[in-house]
Structures are given as C-alpha cells and as structure tokens.
Amino acid sequence: MITLEYLDKLIVTIVAEDSVLYESPFWGQHGISILLEVYKNNIKKNILVDVAQNSEALLHNLSLLNISPLTIDAIVLTHCHYDHTQGLVEILRAIGKNDLPVISHPSIFRLNFITSPYLRHVGVMNRDSKEKIEESGGSLFLTSDPFQVMPGLITTGEVRRQTDFEEVGIPLKTITDDNKIVEDKMKDDISVIANLKDEGMVILTGCSHAGIVNILKHSVEITGENKIKAVIGGLHLVEAPMERIKKTAEALSKFDISLISAGHCTGFEAQVELYHTFKQKFSPLHTGMKFVF
C-alpha cells in the first residue's frame, strides 16, 4: 500500500474531448487531454494527462483557456493509442523545455493494431517515437509501478484485472518478441489519482481499457482510500453490450463516489445508464469543462 499525501487544491480542465457544447469556440477531436493544476505547500504544477491526436486543435484550445504550453511541467500518457499520444512531439516543442517528464508504462511503444475492418496500427506513431520524444525535450519515466508525480498525485501503475465482465473493448493485437501474434490486453492502461483531504480521490482516466471497476478497485487497494470524490475521463463502453454496461453501472454504485463525468469513448448508452444510476452525480464530459476541488 502507498502512503498517499493530500493535495491542497486541484483544478481539472478538459482541454480536448470528442464533444463540445452548443456555440462553444473550442475545437473537438476524437481523443482526450486533461490539464491538472495541482497545488501543494505553496507549489503549483501543471500536469497534462494525454495529448489527444491533433496538436493544432489542442494548442488552439489551450490558447482559448489562456493556458500557455510553457507552463506545463509534466505529461502523463495513459496508454499507447494514437488518440491519446499523437502530436506529442509537437506539444513538447511548443512547451520548449529540456528534460520534461513524460510518464507512462514501459510497453507503450509496442506495435498495437487491429485487423478489422482492415489492418491498422493504432498505437504510438513513428512521428512520436521514443527517440523523437527525447530529441524534443521529453524525459521518459516508464514504469509499471504506481508513480508519484508529486506528493498527493500518483499514477495507478499497471492495473490488476479482477472483474469477470470487463474487457479491453476492442479486438487489439500485438506481436511478441518471438514474432507471435497475440491478443493485446492493454497492460499499459494506467490512470491518475489525486488525493484531497476530507474529499477523497479524484481519478482521471484515459480510456479505462483495464476496466473502470478494476481501476477503482485497484486505486482503493494501493492507497487505502475508500472515498472517491470524482471519476473523470473515458470509460470505453462505446461498443460494450448492454449487459456489461449495466453490470458496470451497478458495480460503480457500490463505491462511495460523489461525481462521475465520462465522455470520449464512454458511449451514449453507457452515459444514459450512468445517469439513471447516479442521477445528478453524473454529467457527460465536454471540451472546456472545468472542475475545482
């Protein structure tokens, strides 16, 4: 178990997401990027969780939000997929720092592909390779363990799979070191945990390929904290059968959760089921949304 300290304050801003609100000036894109403004002992750090897939749109939205890329202090990549990692090199160049921490799982640069409806690589693209990230000022911190970004803010590390109804959600494949094609179980899917005194954990997800219930169980286990202030991000139920959606909503209702805001890969049917389950504690995620804890 990790001894997790408390943050003094957390501001969560949705910089990129699949949807935007009516008459919004923000640009939407398939993907997600979340900015965390983290406060602890008179220190403030800006942590970017994922970069979606279009750096021009991401930088446009940051400008509308009056957030300079120069103020970003670290980047967390929740998993390998292009709609969370594409354009990372351009974002690093816009940030313009040397040795900027880029935190992720060690298997993030593997080949990750689908074969239906046709062969397509969906992982980290060559333009955002390990070498190009480092050339552009990124300093890679790759670990399968929970990683402390600052006291009170950690990654989950590799999530233990515990439920019998959750799955990756896409028929993904990879090629092993001995050249065998195998199912890719997305072991690199990690999330971010922010801990707030008297309020509990705020859990930020990219796609929840590990299963959102698995992620919450794992987060409770590694921290010893049962109270969950918020779950924000993608839940990847967009193609899930209704049976899995219902089981997910029911399992989530067993946790002490004050707020769920889910979008990106969550899907409309899952959003509706979550609303029926959580009522006013649920809200769809949109580009430009801001949460202050």
Image (cartoon, rainbow, N blue to C red):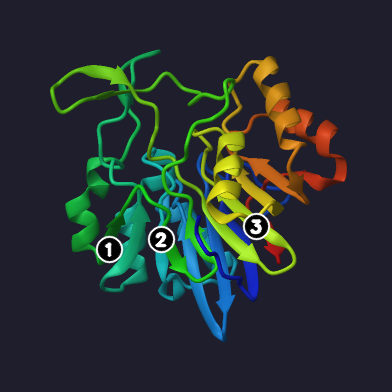
Left/right of residue 181 with respect to residue 167 in the rendered view:
left
Residues at marks 1 and 3, CA–CA distance in whole angstroms: 28 Å
User: For the view shown, which residue lies furthest in the front direction?
Assistant: 1
CA–CA distance between discs 2 and 3? 20 Å
* 157 with respect to 285 (left or right): left
- The first of marks 2 and 3 along the sequence is 2
Tell me the quarter of the picture where residue 38 sits: bottom right
Q: What SS does tag 1 mark? A: strand
| Disc assigned to residue 211 | none
Cα gap from disc 2 to disc 1, whole angstroms: 9 Å
* Amino acid beneath label 2: Ile
Q: Position of residue 44 (x, y in %)?
A: 53, 79
Of residues 200 and 90, the one drawn nearer to the viewer in this rendering: 200
For the residue marked with disc 3, what is the amino acid?
Met
Circle 2 residue = 75
Q: Secondary structure at mark 3?
A: strand
Q: Which residue is mark 3?
A: 201
Front residue of 262 and 250 = 250
